[in-house]
Amino acid sequence: MISDNSDIQKKIIDGRLIAKNIESSISEKVIKLKKNGIVPSIAVILVGDNPASEVYVRNKDIAAKRCGILSKKDIYPASLTEKELLNKIDELNNDPLIHGILVQLPLPPHIDEKKIMEAINPSKDVDGFHPLNVGKIFTENAAFYPCTPYGILKMLDFYDISVKGKNCVVIGQSNIVGKPLSIMLMNRHATVSSLNIFTKDVKSIASKADVLISATGKAHLIDEEYIKDGAVVIDVGISNINGKLCGDVNFEKVVNKVSKITPVPGGVGPLTVAVLMENTVKSASMKS
Ligand code: GUN
């Protein structure tokens, strides 16, 4: 049976709405901080001209301005050396007026991402990628949690979806999403399967998931055969196919089987940005 449009609407996780709620509470905190003479500020560094990264950086800059956060966008050519980038980070680390530093990934191949992440002062690491903050995910006391995984947890919370005792399958093992998210779900007592490109029979594992999260960047990888009836599906992927954005999940094919699903665009993306703003304001508050 094909669901009618109102059935489908009820299943959609509205990332834009949740992000708006988060941003309005951030804006109030920003007003209070400004009254105390603190202007929350973030520096976003982009090296090179990756078109997707340019869009992400622009969205972060616009969101910061919406929340009243001062945003400094530093854009450098792909020819920037590792040493030059390390010097820029050093300047920002030592600038008391900057509360958050974000270096957009991926970086050009001649720059060692690990070295760059380690160079950011952990107290300004609003991306949550410094090894100290990554390690503290295990002990649940990180200063900042990575934005996309944390945004996904906020989505689940918004709809009162508990993962305790549930089968959660995370497809994709990146440092940005899959790995930290798996640990953060384990912290909530989920039974987590972390899948990667070498995993055998992804379909059979995925089809047992109560909560399926896909973060591969492979457009329309997931169809109805990967989905258990009533599953919650979170689509982190974002691909551009002939000028149209689409996710890892073939929305039309799976929507009849799921209980909740994120759209692309308008699902996870806005949450990632909102959590970045939250982390920036948290950093500024720690200075007050
Ligand atoms: N590239 C893709 N996602 C992210 C992110 O959340 N932070 C940074 N710095 N780079 C990214």
Image (cartoon, rainbow, N blue to C red):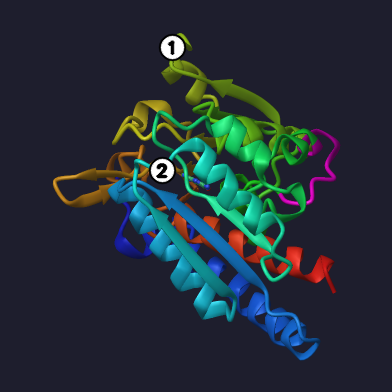
Name above or below for residue 19 compared with residue 107.
below
Q: Secondary structure at mark 2?
A: loop
Name above or below for residue 64 compared with residue 241.
below
Residue identified by numbered label 2: 80
Name above or below for residue 277 compared with residue 106.
below
Q: Position of residue 127 (x, y in %)?
A: 62, 50
Tell me if mark 1 has few (under 14), some (14-19) or many (20+) residues whose alpha carbon lies within 10 angstroms of its own: few
Residue name at image x 45 percent, y 11 percent: 198
Residue name at image x 49 percent, y 25 percent: 206
Q: Quadrant of residue 160?
A: bottom right
Amino acid marked by disc 2: Leu
Q: Position of residue 87 (x, y in %)?
A: 58, 47
Let me know if residue 159 appears in the view.
no
Residue identified by numbered label 1: 201
Amino acid marked by disc 1: Asp
Respond yes or no on whether mark 1 lies under 8 Å from ligand 1. no
| Residue numbers of the magenta segment | 136-144
Let me know if residue 45 appears in the view.
yes
Q: Quadrant of residue 250?
A: top left
215 in the magenta segment: no
Name above or below for residue 36 compared with residue 279.
below
Q: Position of residue 169 (x, y in %)?
A: 57, 28
Residue name at image x 40 percent, y 29 percent: 109
- On screen, residue 100 versus residue 273, left or right, reads right
Residue name at image x 48 percent, y 31 percent: 228
Q: Secondary structure at mark 1?
A: loop
